[in-house]
Image (tube, rainbow, N blue to C red):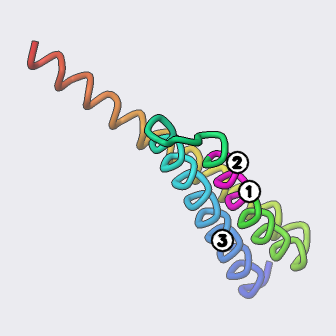
């Protein structure tokens, strides 16, 4: 592979990570706001629509550059998902540890 291809693939991975970060951060914010919201169905629907539109726009831009870029962007998206899950588990484990120390 040439140097330009590697830079392009790196940027595609970065785009995938950014898209994943926005998608899952938006989902987390939506879920946190659902219990106190007077119309949770509307909030969730609008959030889903916005998140999916941004995600599809980003992936369609990657798809115009070729299937390799799309694949690497998808891998970046999945890496962002895994990082998000690991971060949330760490926070939940810290919360459980603190409760055990208090008891």
Q: CA distance from mark 2 to mark 3?
A: 25 Å
Q: Secondary structure at mark 3?
A: helix
| Left or right of 83, for residue 53 | right
> For the magenta stretch, what is the residue range?
44-51
**Tags 1 and 2 in contact by the CB under 8 Å rule?**
yes
Q: Which residue is mark 2?
A: 45
Q: Which residue is mark 3?
A: 15
Q: Residue furthest bottom?
A: 4
On whether residue 42 falls in the magenta region, the answer is no
Residue depicted at 82% across the width and 76% down the height:
61
Kindly report the secondary structure that dominates the magenta region of the rendered protein. Answer: helix
Few, some or many residues within 10 Å of mark 3 (<14, 14–19, 20+)? many
| Quadrant of the rendering where the N terminus is positioned | bottom right
Q: Looking at the picture, how far across and down is residue 80, in whole percent?
A: 57, 53
Residue depicted at 66% across the width and 71% down the height:
15
Q: Residue furthest top?
A: 103
Q: Secondary structure at mark 1?
A: helix
Residue depicted at 64% across the width and 45% down the height:
44
The foreground one among 101 and 2 is 101
Q: Looking at the picture, how far across and down is residue 30, in whole percent?
A: 53, 47
Residue 39 placement: quadrant = top right
The foreground one among 99 and 80 is 99
Q: Which residue is mark 1?
A: 49
On whether residue 47 falls in the magenta region, the answer is yes
Q: CA distance from mark 1 to mark 2?
A: 6 Å
């Amino acid at each position: 592979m040439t140097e330009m291809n590697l830079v392009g693939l790196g940027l595609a991975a970065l785009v995938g990570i950014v898209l994943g970060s926005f998608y899952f951060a938006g989902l987390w914010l939506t879920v946190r706001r659902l219990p106190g919201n007077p119309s949770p169905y509307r909030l969730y629907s609008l959030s889903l629509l916005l998140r999916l539109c941004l995600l599809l726009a980003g992936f369609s831009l990657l798809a115009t550059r070729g299937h390799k870029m799309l694949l690497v962007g998808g891998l970046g998206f999945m890496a962002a998902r895994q990082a998000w899950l690991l971060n949330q588990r760490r926070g939940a484990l810290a919360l459980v540890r603190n409760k055990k120390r208090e008891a």
